[in-house]
Image: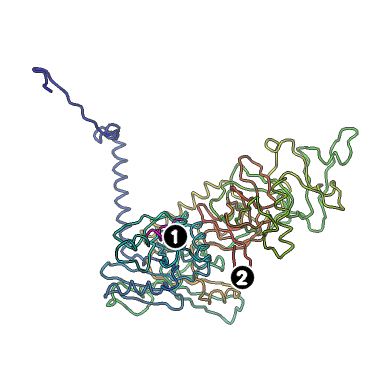
């Protein structure tokens, strides 16, 4: 193509949309340039501080799970050790922990080899791990049923970046390709593997929901110190590497399987597993930080009830019921009809204990929760709103997930317990007629439902969230503004990094090898602490996380679980770093301010479980189990 002469031609090239929309720095005003410079300076300072923290960082924590019976987790650690002649390995046989120092990579690794037959112990190690290594079998196309359940639990709980390994692979040829395809098919139900033809391992990543904003320590050495003056409690010395966020010596710590405790002091010691063997020194105390009794957080998990405070919803145990105020009734109204009338000034008070199969309504306050009440959240996500219940509730509750196929025939199920058969029938009837309740034989409907009152509209009728609360609600804290309380707690945790960089005496920097001096540990926990079957992990708690409140959790029933779970049935909860049993109240997970209580755990979809538990700020992982025996969970 020939261009015309004596004419100027302008060529327009395509440019990115960002280059058009981004303002030039020279066109910024003075205040904008000043803010931009301060942001750049703050980012540089943050990077330098992070690099300084990494210089004294603790070893990388790796959990190894072997699904191949011919190749144990210990053999994997030994294989890693033999890969480098200069590698230095230290074995803690008592706690089943392996420390591997590799000078060539200038890095240290800590390997955990949990007993995979214990799901709780495996989850404890997994929660504090930076990397997960799974060894898959190559000689079988089906996993053992116990291994499949373990992988299901790990997938529901969440896992760190994962390396999927195999012990051996054919050198080349069709057999290698067929083995690789069989492994991909074996791993497909749990992970979408991204294979690489040049390697014999697979890598996948699925980050944990809970961010590591708390300090935690994996116990390597534990020492119990008893005194003759006090036989009911003892002091506990726990040594290990501090990970996560800086630890406040004046704050509270949670010991897995034991509870919340105070610290008397923190002792800094020499690193027992240095990168180079020549730098190894004898263990000696470098310095110690003592807790200040005036600044130390108190263990006030519950409110002490004041019987003289009329605002507390407490009922006198000597009275069978409250006095019912007189209400003006229309002419010709019977007492039975009067009990169903709605009056804003009239509140029916319940004095009898609510049965497990009764259907109540639950309300969610608009104000959320703030320091007067929240609880520990467990299975997937946690509700931020506050919960109030009409009727008697249990002081502790736990929930599990399960699913019931509507086509299940009771004759096809091997059930030896008549009680279980009766639960199956009641659960099926509740699923078919969820809005109908039969009055028991020998009891009139008037007596059976006298504790209930009518609602003109379930959606629009008013409902007082503080109506007919049990005396247990006077012992817990209620959070007025949950979002603000959570924000302040997380900001305080982030501020601890800056305080540690400024050498604040009450904070311990992550990466150091320290000894925690825990005081006033009850003697009943001595056997659990001395046991080596499960790991002993210490977590630092955020502000207000030791207080009891109402905890709402959104759960889903596991598809393969086909047994009915009745409302308020005792279950085992794993919420964050806490493990406890409780009797949860199930309710529908819908929009609005009032929620219908479920007599049985729903067979499909999301539902809400409410318990009394210590406050846990979301996001937090939640798992619920039904304990069939001391070592068997569903």
Q: Report the Cα–Cα distance between label 2 and label 1.
A: 31 Å
**Secondary element at tag 2:** loop
Q: Position of residue 258 (x, y in %)?
A: 56, 68
- Does the rendering let one see residue 304? no
Position in image of residue 284 (x %, y %): 37, 78
Which quadrant of the structure image shows residue 546?
Answer: bottom right
41 to 535, vertically: above or below: above
Residue 426 percent coordinates (x, y): 73, 53
Q: Label 1: how many residues lie within 10 Å, few (<14), some (14-19) or many (20+)?
A: some
Query: Is 146 contained in the magenta span?
Result: no
Task: Give the residue at the far bottom of this rendering.
Answer: 228
361 left or right of 383? Answer: right
Reply above or below: 142 against 34: below
Looking at the picture, tell me which residue is in the foreground, 228 or 330: 330
Q: Magenta span: helix, strand or loop, mainly? A: helix
91 shown above or below 33 = below
* Colour setup of the view: rainbow
Q: Quadrant of the C terminus?
A: bottom right
Q: Is residue 187 magenta?
A: yes
Magenta-colored span:
180-188
- Residue 186's tag is 1
Image point (61%, 79%), residue name: 231
Mark sitting on residue 222: none
Q: Nearer the viewer, residue 301 or 427?
A: 427
Residue 390 is left or right of residue 609, and the answer is right
Query: Dot 1 lies on which element?
Result: helix
Residue that numbered label 2 is attached to: 630
Report whether 156 appears left or right of 242: right
Label 2 or label 1, whichever lies nearer to me, is 1
Label located before the other in sequence (2 or 1): 1
């Amino acid at each position: 193509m020939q261009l015309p002469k004596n004419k100027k031609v302008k060529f327009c090239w395509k440019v990115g949309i960002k280059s058009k929309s981004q303002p030039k720095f020279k066109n910024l005003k003075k205040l904008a340039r000043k803010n931009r410079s301060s942001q750049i300076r703050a980012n540089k300072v943050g990077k330098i501080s992070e690099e300084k923290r990494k210089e004294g960082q603790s070893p990388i924590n790796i959990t190894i799970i072997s699904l191949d019976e011919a190749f144990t987790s210990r053999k994997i650690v030994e294989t890693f050790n033999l890969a480098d002649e200069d590698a230095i390995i230290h074995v803690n046989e008592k706690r089943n922990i392996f420390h591997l120092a590799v000078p060539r990579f200038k890095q240290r690794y800590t390997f955990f080899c949990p007993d995979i037959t214990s799901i709780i112990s495996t989850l404890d190690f997994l929660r504090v791990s930076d990397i997960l290594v799974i060894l898959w079998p190559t000689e079988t196309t089906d996993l053992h049923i116990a291994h499949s359940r373990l992988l299901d639990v790990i997938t529901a709980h969440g896992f760190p970046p994962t390396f999927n390994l195999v012990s051996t692979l054919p050198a080349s040829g069709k057999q290698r390709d067929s083995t690789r395809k069989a492994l991909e098919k074996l791993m497909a139900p749990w992970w979408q593997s991204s294979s690489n033809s040049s390697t014999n391992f697979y890598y996948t990543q699925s980050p944990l929901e809970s961010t590591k904003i708390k300090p935690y320590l994996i116990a390597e050495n534990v020492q119990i110190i008893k005194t003759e003056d006090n036989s009911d409690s003892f002091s506990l010395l726990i040594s290990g590497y501090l990970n996560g966020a800086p630890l406040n010596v004046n704050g509270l710590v949670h010991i897995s399987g034991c509870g919340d405790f105070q610290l008397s002091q923190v002792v800094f010691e020499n690193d027992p597993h240095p990168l180079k063997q020549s730098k190894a020194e004898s263990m000696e105390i470098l310095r110690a930080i003592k807790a200040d009794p005036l600044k130390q957080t108190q263990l006030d998990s519950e409110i002490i009830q004041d019987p003289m405070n009329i605002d507390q919803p407490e009922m006198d145990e000597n009275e069978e019921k409250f006095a019912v105020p007189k209400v003006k009734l229309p002419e010709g109204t019977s007492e039975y009809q009067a009990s169903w009338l709605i009056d804003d000034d009239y509140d029916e008070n319940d004095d009898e204990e609510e049965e497990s199969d009764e259907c109540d309504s639950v309300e969610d306050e608009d104000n959320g929760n703030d320091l007067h009440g929240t609880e520990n959240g467990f299975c997937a996500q946690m509700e931020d709103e506050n919960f109030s219940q009409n009727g008697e509730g249990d002081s502790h509750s736990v929930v599990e997930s399960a699913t019931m196929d509507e086509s299940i025939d009771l004759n096809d199920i091997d059930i030896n317990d008549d009680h279980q058969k009766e639960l199956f029938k009641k659960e099926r009837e509740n699923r078919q007629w969820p809005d109908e309740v039969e009055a028991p034989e020998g009891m009139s409907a008037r007596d059976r439902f006298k504790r209930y009152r009518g609602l003109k509209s379930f959606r629009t009728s008013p409902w007082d969230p503080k109506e007919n609360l049990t005396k247990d609600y006077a012992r817990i804290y209620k959070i007025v503004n949950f979002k603000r309380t959570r924000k302040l707690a997380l900001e305080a945790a982030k501020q601890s990094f800056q305080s540690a960089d400024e050498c604040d005496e009450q904070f311990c920097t992550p990466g150091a090898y320290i000894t925690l001096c825990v005081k006033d540990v009850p003697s009943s926990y001595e056997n659990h602490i001395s046991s080596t079957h499960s790991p002993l992990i210490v977590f630092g708690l955020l502000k207000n996380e030791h207080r009891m409140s109402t905890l709402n959790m959104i759960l889903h029933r596991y598809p393969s679980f086909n047994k009915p779970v009745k409302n308020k049935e005792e279950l085992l909860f794993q919420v964050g770093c806490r493990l406890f049993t409780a009797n949860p109240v199930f309710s529908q997970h819908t929009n609005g301010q009032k929620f219908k209580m479920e007599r049985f755990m729903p067979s499909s979809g999301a539902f809400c479980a409410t318990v009394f538990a210590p406050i846990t700020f979301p996001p937090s992982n939640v798992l619920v189990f039904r304990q069939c025996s001391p070592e068997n969970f569903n």
